[in-house]
Image (cartoon, rainbow, N blue to C red):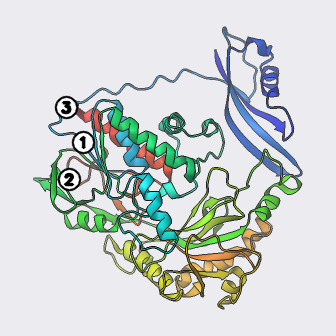
Amino acid sequence: MKLIVHNIKLSLDDDINSLKRMAAKKLKIDSKEFINFRIVKESVDARKKPDIFLVYSVMVEIPGKIKVPNSNDVRIVEDNIEEKLIPGDKKLKYRPVIIGTGPAGLFAALVLSQNGYRPLVLERGECVEKRTEIVNSYWNGGELNSETNVQFGEGGAGTFSDGKLTTRINDRRCTKVLEEFYNFGAPEEILYKAKPHIGTDILKKVIVNMRKKIIELGGEVRFNSKVTSIKIKDGKVTGVVVNGSETIDAEVVVLAIGHSARDTFLSLFESGIEFIQKPFSVGVRIEHPQELINKAQYGAAASHPHLGAADYQLFYKLKDRTVYSFCMCPGGVVVAAASEPNMIVTNGMSEYARDRENANSALVVSVGPGDFGSGHPLAGVEFQRNWERLAFTVAGSCNAAPIQRLEDFIDGRVSVKLGTVKPSYTGKTSFADLNLCLPVFVTGPMKESIKYFDDRLKGFGIGDALLTGVETRTSSPVRIQRTETFESTKVKGLYPAGEGAGYAGGIVSAAVDGIKVAEQIIKTYNVL
């Protein structure tokens, strides 16, 4: 018999081994009866500072049956028998082709490989080892590589991030995603932490191990292989063209191209693939001392080793806009994340230890089709480009990111010196007025939100908080329309997937979407 026991509270100094005893007490049995015991969730309850607790849910297994206590904290676990994938009747003439190695592409490739479909994976950028060298060179003043950068290359945009594995979706496949990450080298805690993260340093190693497993199972992964066009005949995909010259035949193609593949978006649109505009958000990165955030969240317990670097999540709702924190990176850095020349784009990144001096987060405002100035399906892309070019220009057209103290941003003046917060940005910075490189309908709500956020997170509104512009790649500006079978509405055999196609919002949800697409391909087609 398996049971989940919820709401077991430990103080920060309690011995973790007391969990068994406390679970047994709730079940009214002796812990010696447990034949299996594991933590399934751990979270922090800091609502009543200074009394902070670690709250656990655990799963226990006992050999027989017991009378289950009448409590919301205890429930019986039924064995979850995973649905067996039965291959479809259609015979594949060619192996499936997957475009992109972000979470959607990697997990689609993994599932297809695990079921004998030997996919061919095409990535426009470099493998993660060489990609890291190229990105570091750019951050140190080198030239931007438009094919290998923070947006493009093995692992996708999430590789140079915090590696957050939180998600709002409720799907059984989320468990598979976490378990596979663990199998490929992520720490075991991601299986039970309420807010799991890997960190960019560990995530890179995990991605390499995933690639090796896909190859071991018969798949192939090719780098520096940019798909420049899709071959279509009679409403069906017939292949792809790589690097403008090589044609690869295929009747199944997965589009896991990421949210920044603007040239690919255009090529697909010109081929007749159906796109629609999609809302997203734009704004800046905001940095505070991590110590300030720790004290605001944990009070006197801020330095306790069981807590680590604190995070936050903030929302401010206006009539027609929402201002919110996004992709918060405790103990991290702000990174240069452009993918096109003469543009400035920021993102946030943390390593597993989250031990850098600053906390950073995107501070963004929702925008939508009514803001893009055109009904063209790709108008959101041009909207992003406009503000990225302005950020480049206002900072001196020298590939520096514009920075500004929060107090100066609110008052509309260029900062003349730094305060207590030093920029962590992985490139050059220049003082500029960020009001000049974002629309008023974004900067206005951002300013209005500050006092509200400061009331909820003391210190958020300090004048020395540092803003770096601009954050524009929060999610895809388009959605590639697809049917209930995950195929493009216009082209059979073409499967838009993941965040770039407009069907996910983070590592886990993108991976889950890739799994769903792979499962549909398996249910439709038989192995070679």
The answer to whether 116 appears left or right of 249 in the picture is right
Of marks 2 and 1, the one in the foreground: 1
Q: Which mark is residue 491?
A: 2
Name the residue: 48% across, 80% down: 399
Residue receiving disc 1: 96
- Report the amino acid beneath label 2: Val
Taking the spot 68% from the left edge, 70% from the top edge, the residue there is 287
Mark 3: which secondary structure?
Answer: loop
Residue at the far top in the pictured view: 64
Q: Position of residue 259 (x, y in %)?
A: 40, 62
Q: Amino acid at mark 3?
A: Leu
As drawn, 22 above or below 102: above
Q: Name the residue located 20 percent from the left edge and 53 percent from the top edge.
A: 491
Q: Which residue is mark 3?
A: 528
- Is residue 203 visible from the viewing direction of this image? yes
Question: Mark 3 or mark 2, which has the lower sequence index?
Answer: 2
Task: Measure how far apart labels 2 and 1 are at the Cα level.
Answer: 15 Å
Q: Quadrant of residue 313?
A: bottom right
- Residue 223 is left or right of residue 273, and the answer is right
Can residue 237 be seen in this snapshot? no
**How far apart are the alpha carbons under marks 1 and 3?**
10 Å
Tell me if label 3 and label 2 are in contact, CB under 8 Å: no
On screen, residue 50 versus residue 480, left or right, reads right
Quarter of the rendering containing residue 519 = top left
Say which residue appears at 43% left-offset and 52% top-offset. 128
The residue nearer to you, when weighing 223 against 385, is 223
Residue farthest left in this picture: 234
* CA neighbours of label 3 inside 10 A, class few (<14), some (14 to 19), many (20+): few
Q: Quadrant of residue 9?
A: top right
Depth check: give the residue in front, 58 or 309: 309
